[in-house]
Image (tube, rainbow, N blue to C red):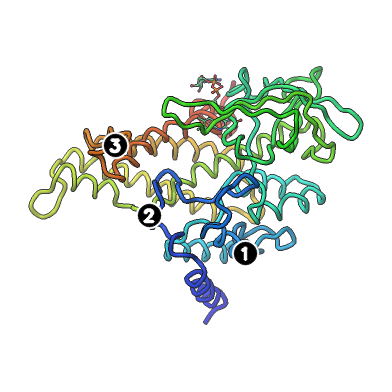
Amino acid sequence: MSDLQEFREEVRAWLDANCPASLRWGAAVGNEALGDGLYWGGKKERSAATDAKLWLDRMAARGWTAPTWPKAYGGGGLSKEEAKILAEEMRRLRCKPALVGFGLTMIGPLLLQYGNEQQKSRFLPEIVRGEVRWCQGYSEPEAGSDLAGLRARAVRDGDFYVVNGQKVWTSYADKSDWMFMLVRTDPDKPKHEGISFMLIDMDQPGVTVKPIKLISGQSPFCETFLEDARVSAEHVVGGINNGWTMAKALLGHERSMISEAFNESEDKNELVSAARRYVGVESGGRVADAALRDRIAQLTMDKLCLELTLKRTKEAAKLGHQPGPEASIFKYYATELNKDRSALLVGILGPQGLGWEGEGFDEDELAHTRAWLRARGNSIEGGTSEIQLNIIAKRVLGLPD
Ligand SMILES: Cc1cc2nc3c(=O)[nH]c(=O)nc-3n(C[C@H](O)[C@H](O)[C@H](O)COP(=O)(O)OP(=O)(O)OC[C@H]3O[C@@H](n4cnc5c(N)ncnc54)[C@H](O)[C@@H]3O)c2cc1C
């Protein structure tokens, strides 16, 4: 048996013995399509005694919440081939990820790439163990697409920076312990050159978080106010006034993460199953609507092409390759495709796809409606589709401004 085959057998046996039944996809824990039952960790997490925490602790002890990160920082130290096997076996046994969040997908990879030794040893192990939850302080009221127009200001004061300003759309700031953020450190330099990337402890008097209530009643976003908040000078990543390079690198990780999220749909035949149920079947079992069959076939092929292209790009990437402007292609394509796909699914459901709550709709129907509405945010967060097209035009295709 090859080493990798042996590794696969070991992983399979360990996962099966250690992943609690309630942490397998399909176990009833609320609305799975919206991420219910996933564990984000952090000091404000309330479900410390649950199976989710047990699963996290077991996976973190092996470093498998961050399988490819170096063991020195608490990661699993797995090769790409081993990490692929772990992911495949988790999918096979329907194990949910033990931990999700911006620590693993955004700030962790950035620190591995640009952090100094002290920052890596300080922050990475606690991310792996899910002890600290992170949020992203990029957008401001006047700086979204034009991110480099940001105005939150940081001024040096001894061993610290004093920060004043406002961030907006800070997802889960009210549940986070730390925030990675962009601030202006030199207002006299051209706008891209006077920005720094800093890590700020949210648990201090100068940081106020106000959830923004949406029409749905949920509050995934917050406004974050910084009034004489303090950041240790040790927590500037990548050097002072070098924040724009950090911002772009991190957005590369964010855009890859968003596009890959659609690569892992649990039910590949979801559209067909829904069409059979709500539209009906002809003799022989085909969906009883030729135009709908065409649309489903097209979208299914598009999704498969995306999945294969993502896979090919990953496998072809040289060791140490980091996502660059080409991440915009995937981010644009994946999020637009997901909007089309979820709109078609809700269309197939007809009036049953328009339920918000209450009797008359089953759990799947409510999940599809909410997933359809949530999908619209995917082509805005991490930079809108228009901005991705601008980046592709300028930085991938080299077209003139
Ligand atoms: C679900 C979700 C989660 C988010 N989470 C976070 C978070 O955690 N942290 C954070 O910092 N931010 C977050 N954001 C904010 C997000 O990054 C911004 O909404 C996004 O960058 C767009 O900025 P804006 O909302 O200010 O829109 P604007 O920049 O005002 O854009 C408005 C419209 O104008 C278009 N437009 C603007 N400039 C151009 C141009 N040059 N060319 C063509 N079209 C243009 C845009 O495409 C858009 O359609 C989140 C947003 C969403 C939807």
Residue found at x 73% / y 49%: 123
Q: Is residue 216 above or below residue 133?
A: above
Q: Is residue 194 visible?
A: no
Residue bearing the label numbered 2: 28
Q: Which mark is residue 358?
A: 3
Q: Earlier in the sequence, mark 1 or mark 3?
A: 1
Q: Is residue 164 visible?
A: yes
Q: Earlier in the sequence, mark 2 or mark 3?
A: 2
Report ligand 1 position as a quadrant.
top right
Q: Position of residue 318 (x, y in %)?
A: 62, 54
Q: Secondary structure at mark 2?
A: loop
Q: Position of residue 46 (x, y in %)?
A: 57, 48
Left or right of 368: which side holds 99?
right
Instruction: Name the outermost residue toward the left.
Output: 283
Q: Is residue 146 above or below residue 280?
A: above
User: For residue 198, which quarter of the picture?
Assistant: top right
Structural distance between the alpha carbons of marks 1 and 3 = 48 Å
Q: Alpha-carbon neighbours of circle 2 within 10 Å: few (<14), some, or many (≥20)?
A: few
